[in-house]
Image (cartoon, helix red, strand yellow):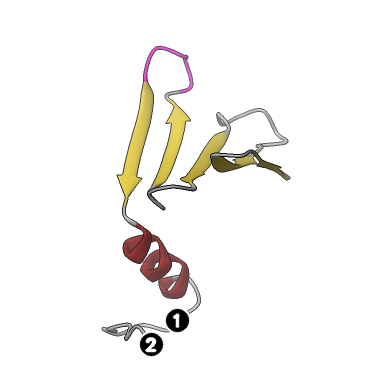
Amino acid sequence: MFTNEFKFDKSVTTLLDETGQNSDVIITIDNDSGYVYIEQDDGEDLLTNLICIPPHMFKELFEALHSTEGAYRLIER
């Protein structure tokens, strides 16, 4: 299950674990910079793991999930 929220300065997608076994994953895209922040609590709410990636790497991640095994280079048009 997931939710989408669109705010004036960012877009937020929250991935919810319906089993309750894992913490939610929150993906925030900053509208100004395009940077993508992926965060998840450690399960005990003591720490938050955070990854910040630039827009071109997020696009590569998305494409990689839809590609077969191999090495690829995306060409911007």
Is residue 64 left or right of 13 when viewed as pictured?
A: left
Disc 2 marks a residue whose amino acid type is Arg
Dominant secondary structure (helix, strand or loop) of the stretch shown in magenta: loop
Q: Secondary structure at mark 1?
A: loop
Q: Residue at x 61, y 29 (%)?
A: 21
Out of 10 and 44, give the one closest to the viewer.
10
Span of residues in magenta? 43-47
Q: Nearer the viewer, mark 2 or mark 1?
A: 2
Q: Position of residue 2 (x, y in %)?
A: 70, 44
Q: Position of residue 60 (x, y in %)?
A: 37, 70
- From the image, tell me which residue sits under label 1: 67
Pointer 2 or 1: first along the chain = 1
Is residue 15 left or right of 68 when viewed as pictured?
A: right
Residues packed near mark 2 inside 10 Å, few (<14), some (14 to 19) or many (20 plus): few
Residue 44 on the magenta span: yes
Classify the position of the C terminus by image quarter. Answer: bottom left
Image quarter for residue 37? top left
Image quarter for residue 7? top right
Disc 1 marks a residue whose amino acid type is Ser
Image quarter for residue 23? top right
- From the image, tell me which residue sits under label 2: 77
Is residue 74 left or right of 16 when viewed as pictured?
A: left
Residues packed near mark 1 inside 10 Å, few (<14), some (14 to 19) or many (20 plus): few
Q: Residue at x 40, y 65 (%)?
A: 61
Residue 72 on the magenta span: no
